[in-house]
Image: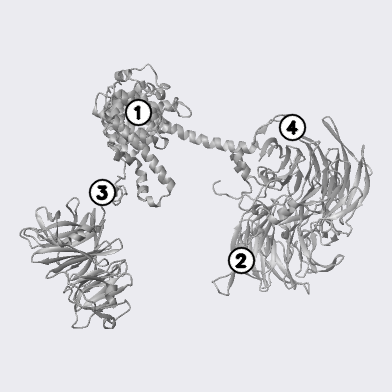
Amino acid sequence: MGEFQVHRVRFFGLVPAGVRCIAYQPRGTRLALARTDGTVEVYNFAANYFQEKVIPGHEARSVESLCWAAGARLFGAGLGGDITEYDLAGLSVGRGVDGGGGPVWSMVANGTGTQLAIGCEDGSVKIFQVVAEGIQFERNLDRRKGRVLCLSWHPSDTHIVAGSIDFFRVIDVASGQTVQRIMVNHHVEKAKRECVVWAIALLSSGTAVSADSFGRVQFWDWQQGTLAESCAVSTSAVLSLAVSEKEDSIVVGTSTGATLQLQLLPVRLGGLEKQWVRTKVFQFHSHDVRAVAHSPTALISGGLDAQLVIRPLMEKMQKKNYDAVLRKFIFPHRRLVSCARKARLLLFQFSQYLELWRLGSTEETGKDGEVLPLCRMPEHLLQLKSKGPEHIYCSSVSPCGTWLGYSTASRFQLYRVHCDGDGVSLSKVPKVPKLLPPAYQLQFSAGSDSLFVASARGSVHVFQLLEPGGCKHLHTLRPPSGCSEAVYLLAPSADGRWLAAVSGDWAIHIYNLKCFKHHCVVPRYDCAVSALAIHPTTNNLVIAYSDQQLSEFSIPEKQYTGWSRAVQSRGLHRLWLERDSPITHITFNPKNASHILLHDTFLLCVLDKSLPLPDDGAILMNQSTLKQLPETARKRQLHAFKICKKFQPLLFMDLLDKNCLVVVERPIMDFKTQLPQPVQQKKFGT
Amino acid sequence: MAALCESFTLRGPGPGGGGPGLCLEPGPGRDLVLLTERGRAATLFKISDQKPLGCWSVKHGQILTCPVVCNFETHEFIAVHDDKVLRIWKNEDINLDKAFKATLSADVYRIHSLPQAGPVVLFRGGAARTLDVLLEAPQQEIENLISAEVIRWSGAFMEGQQPVLIFTTEKDGDFFVYVQKPKLSSLHKYKLEQQESATPLCFTAHITNQTVTLLCLYSNDSVYQVLIPLQQDIEEEEEKEKEEILSKSLLLKLSVSGAVLKGTSLVVVDKDHVAVLGSLAASGNKPEEYLTVWNTKFQTLQTSKELPLGTSGQLWCYEEKFFLFHGKVLTVILYKCETSSLAAAVGKLKDSQTLDVSSFVNWNTLEDEEQVVSFQSQQSVALKAESRMNLRSRRSTVDEQSGTLSVGQLLLKLKNASTYVLETELRQLMAKAPTPDLQATIGCVVTALIDRCKRNPKYYPQTFLQEIVETRNLSYSLCPDLMAVALEKNDMHLLQICLERFPDIPEEITYACLKTFLSMSEEYLQSIDVNLDSAICYVDVEYNDTEFKIETLENGFSAEMEQDMCDTKTPRQSRSDGESCPVGLRKAALLNAVLHSAYTETFLLPHLKNLPPQQAVLFLRYLYYLYVKCSEKVNTTLPGVRSPTINQIMDWMCLLLDAQFTVMAMLPEAKDLVSNLHRFVRAQVRFYSELNKMEGSLRELQRLNLLRESQTYSIEVLEII
């Protein structure tokens, strides 16, 4: 097919923030995750664990606890002392309600999801009522000295157990009185040190399960106040604990990065007497596992090493499917890099600043695998810090490299980039039309003459960019039937005629930009769209779904193309469908209309529509095989998917010109070194 | 070789045992035998289980007059009691009285059951009927064919689809043989040649290729063989009246180092072996009974087993087991009988009748056309199975055969031609040799040349042979005499080429070459032409041809002590050992050829032990020199084409030290060499262990470097196919 000059970029210093807490939606398919920088993410387990919503963080807003209540409403509370509801449709943070007890360390919803209990710094436990407009303070429960680090409702909602330092107590919800107070550091030699109860759970059987900083998981009969069982699961602290809905399995996370499963098993086979037994130990994380969750079929853990690990329980699996495989996620399922193809600039988006780099260049050519000598080194042109405590939602640089924009929760900024020789200067575009931020996606047109801003309620604003540095709001595109969800992906066509927009309900609307009219809706496919792009010559919209399906929709003809139908009827290769991460970017080769370039975190693929699709018997990753074959023998082995796995983990890939690629990698080791030191453990042989 | 294996008891001492009509017949399946005994009962045994499966007996007063047999087709049992009454029953039947009964019109001698043709009933009068015919009309008239003759023995075989019945009769000391085909109702009568003062005691027969081989055990302790053709010639039919006399030939004398075996029973084991049960009458002692197995080909006793409790004198043999009554116990003796022929050894044992092609190639005796055909040894099997072959492959076989035939003929023709004519013809032949058999043809040519050399000591076509060996991919097995002749003629160059090229030189020849090379004087070698490529690059050309000096030691240990104490200092002796080549350039080249040849340690070692001590030391010295030379280079290889590799040198050195350990320990001149070698090796070991450590650190460094090398930016070329 051909050789590419690949600009292999590893200077994107992204350090994903550690996972602080996770909440698995009860009887749902979604997982909410909060990172240490305050970002809240929602993963949809039904859509191949796609990270479908991201609400960027805020410098002053830490999230200590997340919980789902009243069905699909997500609440968070943190050391700021506020309880906030997240607007998952509008991807924004609602107005906070002050907890009134200082920093909130923990928050749990009751079984019915109608009440929230928060544990505060001042030792109080407060109950809030979930109402339609938000939450409403209900009452204070018995206040004792010592911060409440963890809370758990009894499944019947009659009692709450609250863990503090050195003790935990059981509170009767109806009377608000503490009915039992249990010291956890009794009979321990280490009693000189304080024993932090990091996590606690109250089971329906009347057992309280505590996880403490001494590395113990203890089972208490809270009515008697006696210790029933104690499992020393770790030499260091046990930080998190989650109980399965059936209360027969517990997952705990420790500060050494290990996650353990404890199961309630009969002492004798077939006997009635049961005992909690430590059954499985996993070491997926290198750092503290601050958050665990127990879905019906999997153990979910999130660590300070930024990893989200979903470990399926094979005994709960009915059949081998996509869910039956261990999944690990570190990198976001969206683009943080944008590329000015013509100017050869890369814009990196960090949580609170942007970096603009100019790519290096070479004058040499070479053979496959060779590293070419550079005649110009890449250049860090500028760093643009966002003002205020809010994190950046999205950013973009125009193809010609002269415009640059970003948006935070409350502000939208557009800059003009002046490149004069080696120097680069920015000038802020004045009088940017005031619109309702935030923007969820910014996209410059191919000719850099207009800017599309994805906004809430399915709307897309079209700005006209004016020389030498101006901006005019042209139109706002809205789906005719209305939409409550925000648009999160945009794809303009190269000829400036069309714009495709995907909103959170996964509907793809296509607008005609010549007359600013809604053109059509792509037939609904019930899965999240992870990437889409419009072919520059054919105006076919190529869509990648998070379940790894691909389709091609002809915009002028308003129907799927023949190739797309062939793909659907034929089915994609099994290995393609079993991939870990979704396609995050699609681009095209202007010189060859049949080529589609796609990438996910672990591979880049040139999809050649002119070649036959591989069937399940064929080798999907056949590049290395092909390279060993003589030219003549390759013919029969060729298939449409030309996959290269050389660059990993891949955060971005784009085609600069017909045989020049840019790939942005973030080697795991590079960012691991930037994490704090993990708990020292003696390893065998070191 | 035949061998008797373990024995076991099939039935313990029964009530009575023996008795008239004691007989063992094969049962209705494998592992089953049918025993008829006491004239009254028949028992079916499962041999491997050593237990009876069923027993049937006739009523009191009745008597079984011939052995009970099994009809292999219907699995029914057939018995005759009171001479005329036929009984047929199945395994499930318990009571014999209720079994099928037919009364015949004549006395039955015996029933023979044949695997594919059903039972045949032989009457005392010599007539035979198949059971089917007989059962159609049990009362049919049975003719009497033999008047006043008494049947002594009978046997039945299948010839093609025809049952053949053979029985012998006796009348007044004359023995007659009848061959009868019941289905064709043909009968031949032969008279058995008389034997002076001996009478047949026991008969047995087998049938091969339309010929009945009748073996007769005579009372003069000999086994005679009588061949009876089965072909039915029309003339013969006409001359039926004339009584033919069968001549017999002595097959075996049953005598073992003077002692004579008085045989009582004889069975054929296979085509080369017979088993004889008899008593050995050693002088003065009570005769003891033995079971013996004899090889008829070589007239030798193969194995025997003493049966001290005595036997009933009867022996049966089914399914590779002997059955006999030892005392009162029915004993089963397992045996193994493998023909010790060459054909068996090469696994090509075939019936010699079909196609007389020897199954192995004898390159030595390429005398006439038949043996040229033996080029096609691989095809011989295919030829036999011609009917199964498709037309195409048959044609190719024929073609090749004719091609090689012409080579054979040509060689035959040239056998006595003049040297010049021979060589020219052979060159032509080689030029146009058919490609599929090229190797075989060249093998023939070389063999022909070598044969000529052997016949004519003055003839030795050195250059021609060299040319052949150099240009063609010959192997040792294709022309086994070539190297022997070359050794004889001291043709060093040819030997060198052979050693370098043949992949399959026997270790014996390799050793012979080594010995010859080592023993050659340098002066002689100077005069001959040897390929020096392998040695010229590292051996110093100005050869110091003084023999190695034997350094006189002041006392037994001082030098060694000194050397041990100062390891780092290189003594002068070792310098000379390591630095100058102990052999001349030509000899080095020849030795390199030996080092290059393929060998198996186990087979080479015994030969190496015979190497004269002086030569062994010289060889070791040379190996040491090579070793030192190798170690000079970083990549431990010697320069030049086909120069020995370090592994070859090491292997040979180990081998030589192993083989000549005592010599090296005892010989005074070896002492220095060995201790120098030891020091050198020790130094190397230390050196390499240091290198090992260094490698570890370097690898770690490289690993770290790789990590560090991961630059933040590079432009690479990626090919996507």
Query: In the structure shown, which secondary structural element does the residue marked by tag 4 occupy?
Result: loop
Q: Are marks 3 and 2 on the same chain?
A: no
Say which residue label 1 marks: B426
Above/below status of B387 relative to B124: above
Mark 3 or mark 1: name the one nearer the start of the chain: 3
Q: Do labels 2 and 4 share a chain?
A: yes
**How many C-alpha atoms fall within 10 Å of the one at disc 4: few (<14), some, or many (≥20)?**
some
Say which residue label 4 marks: A361
Q: Are marks 4 and 1 on the same chain?
A: no
Q: Quadrant of residue B625?
A: top left
Say which residue label 3 marks: B341
Q: Where is residue A291 in the image (x, y as percent from the top left)?
A: 70, 58
- Which tag is nearer the camera, tag 3 or tag 4? 3
Question: From mark 2 to mark 4, how far is it between C-alphas?
Answer: 58 Å
Query: In the structure shown, which secondary structural element does the residue marked by tag 1 occupy?
Result: helix
**Label 1 close to label 2 by CB (< 8 Å):** no
Q: Which colour scheme is used?
A: one colour
Query: In the structure shown, which secondary structural element does the residue marked by tag 2 occupy?
Result: strand
Residue A263, labelled with which disc? 2
Asked whether, in this view, residue B336 is left or right of residue A571, the answer is left
Three-letter amino acid code at disc 3? Ser
Q: Where is residue A461 in the image (x, y as percent from the top left)?
A: 89, 50
- Which tag is nearer the camera, tag 1 or tag 2? 1
Q: Which chain carries label 1?
A: B
**How many C-alpha atoms fall within 10 Å of the one at disc 1: few (<14), some, or many (≥20)?**
many
